[in-house]
Image (cartoon, grey):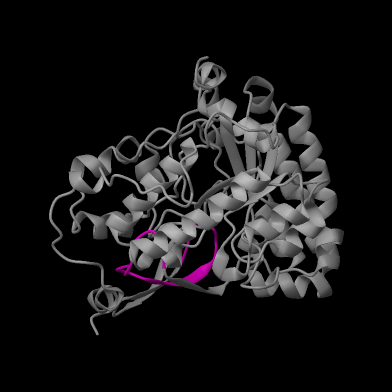
């Protein structure tokens, strides 16, 4: 019998069926993480070919779908002092950034003012969010020069990607999962109003919040309608990041009033266009979100941050049809290999018992995780994915033997000192 493809495996897991093996999925290191790992023996070639080096199954996207304002706001620096910059960004928000980021990829910023505070502001903003603007899906020539930004991590910055039309044939033939995603209604409105502004508007200007979330729902459906009629997408992920450590950022009543009707429509929209699984990406505690949206408007959620109080096994028991990704506590990867092993075993034990779950690191992989620990986790996951015994299997550590010598380990205090000079 031929081995299943990565795409077939994912679809089986989503359906709570048993694949021939679990996916090789680990989690994504950020720029500062690779910078730290280069000093721990990772070569330039290994970094450049990272997915091949660690043997990740991978996946395929469906092209560029720019979701920021067009035209973007004109960026303006208001003040620079020491390592801080006060400026207005391409989204129209006034904010404070570290000029030299201590950990690139995990940007340090705070916001002073957001562009939408009133209905008049919203009417002006709405004109920048036309889903039919050609530049959203067709790369603008010379985009790097025209849309150059001070944004340290590229957030919502215009980028010139590949048009979905040029990927349609490759997606239809793909042996790897085909995925797509966009910002959800909460994320979009928070970008316009800020967390505090949106929270107050829910009580003081509820009609305005309804209008903004309604526009975004329409925007998403218009933006993705034609592409999804031509490309078979396996998983569509709505990014929200709408939770704290132990609570959602909206009450259950507000989620049901403002978001659930839009999520029902989006869920139906994606399903009618052949999407097999609709998920949400939300940091923080996910339990209340799932109580509201699953199963009628969401099939799954990620990344299951353990520090926020999430427990994959609890969710798998509570929601028997759920699809989960993540849940390997990144904090445990900082210490000994024994602790790494115990954490990975715990998550794989739940995955084997309940199905519907792909364990991987529970958010971006930060630079304080030692490279050798991460590669040990990679080989553990590969072994457990193939069915090795959870109690006795010990990986061969072949990846570690391919590394160069350690020059220095990451020191967060030193990274801050180098960025801020004190």
Q: Residue 263 vs residue 136: left or right?
A: right
Image quadrant containing the C terminus:
bottom left
Position above or below: 73 against 143:
below
Task: Answer above or below: position of 413 versus 387.
Answer: below
Give the farthest residue toward the bottom. Answer: 422
Q: Residue at x 31, y 41 (%)?
A: 50
Range of the magenta residues?
88-107
Residue in view at x 39 percent, y 44 percent: 146
Q: Residue at x 20, y 58 (%)?
A: 40
Report whether residue 75 is seen.
Answer: yes
Q: Point out the residue furthest to the front here.
A: 392
Residue 104 magenta-highlighted: yes
The percent coordinates of residue 132 (x first, y second) are: 65, 34
Q: Nearer the viewer, residue 255 or 208?
A: 255
Q: Is residue 122 above or below residue 11?
A: below
Left or right of 189, for residue 368: left
Residue 264 spot, x, y in % from top left = 83, 45
Residue 114 at x, y = what percent?
60, 69
Question: Toward which corner of the image does residue 206 lie, by quadrant?
Answer: bottom right
> Which secondary structure dominates the residues rendered in magenta?
loop
Quadrant assignment, res 305: bottom right
Q: Nearer the viewer, residue 121 or 211?
A: 211
Camera-nearest residue between 279 and 406: 406
Q: Does the segment drawn in magenta span residue 380?
A: no
Q: Which percent across, then down, holds residue 208?
A: 80, 62
> Which image quarter: residue 241?
bottom right
């Amino acid at each position: 019998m031929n081995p299943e493809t990565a795409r077939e495996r994912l679809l089986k897991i989503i359906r709570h069926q048993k694949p021939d093996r679990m996916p090789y999925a680990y989690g994504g290191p950020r720029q500062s993480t690779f910078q730290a790992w280069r000093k721990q023996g990772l070569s330039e070639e290994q970094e450049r070919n990272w997915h091949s080096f660690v043997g990740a199954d991978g996946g395929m996207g469906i092209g560029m779908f720019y979701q920021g304002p067009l035209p973007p706001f004109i960026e303006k620096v208001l003040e620079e002092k020491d390592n801080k910059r006060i400026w207005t960004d391409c989204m129209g928000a006034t904010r404070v950034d570290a000029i030299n980021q201590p950990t690139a990829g995990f940007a340090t910023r705070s916001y002073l003012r957001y562009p939408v505070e009133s209905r008049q502001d919203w009417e002006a903003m709405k004109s920048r969010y036309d889903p039919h603007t050609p530049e959203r899906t067709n790369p603008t020539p010379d985009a790097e020069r025209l849309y150059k930004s001070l944004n340290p991590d590229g957030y919502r910055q215009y980028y010139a990607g590949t048009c979905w039309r040029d990927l349609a044939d490759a997606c239809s033939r793909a042996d790897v999962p085909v995925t797509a995603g966009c910002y959800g209604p909460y994320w979009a409105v928070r970008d316009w109003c800020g967390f505090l502004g949106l929270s107050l508007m829910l009580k003081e200007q509820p009609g305005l919040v309804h209008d903004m979330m309604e526009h975004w729902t329409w925007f998403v459906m218009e933006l993705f309608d034609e592409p999804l009629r031509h490309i078979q997408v396996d998983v569509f992920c709505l990014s929200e990041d709408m939770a704290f450590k132990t609570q959602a950022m909206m009450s259950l009543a507000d989620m049901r009033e403002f978001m659930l009707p839009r999520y029902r429509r989006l869920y139906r929209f994606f399903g009618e266009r052949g999407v097999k699984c609709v998920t949400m990406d939300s940091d923080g505690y996910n339990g209340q979100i799932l109580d509201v949206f699953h199963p009628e408007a969401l099939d799954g959620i990620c990344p299951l941050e353990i520090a926020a109080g999430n427990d994959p096994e609890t969710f798998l028991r509570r929601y028997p049809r759920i699809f989960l990704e993540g849940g390997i506590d990144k904090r445990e990867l900082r210490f000994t290999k024994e602790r790494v092993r115990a954490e990975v075993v715990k998550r794989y034990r739940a995955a084997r018992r309940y199905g519907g779950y792909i364990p991987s690191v529970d958010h971006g992989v930060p630079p304080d995780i030692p490279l050798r620990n991460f590669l040990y986790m990679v080989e553990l996951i590969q072994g457990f994915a193939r069915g090795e015994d959870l109690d006795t299997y010990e990986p061969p550590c072949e990846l570690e033997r391919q590394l160069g010598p350690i020059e220095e380990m990451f020191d967060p205090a030193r990274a801050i000192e180098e960025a801020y000079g004190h």
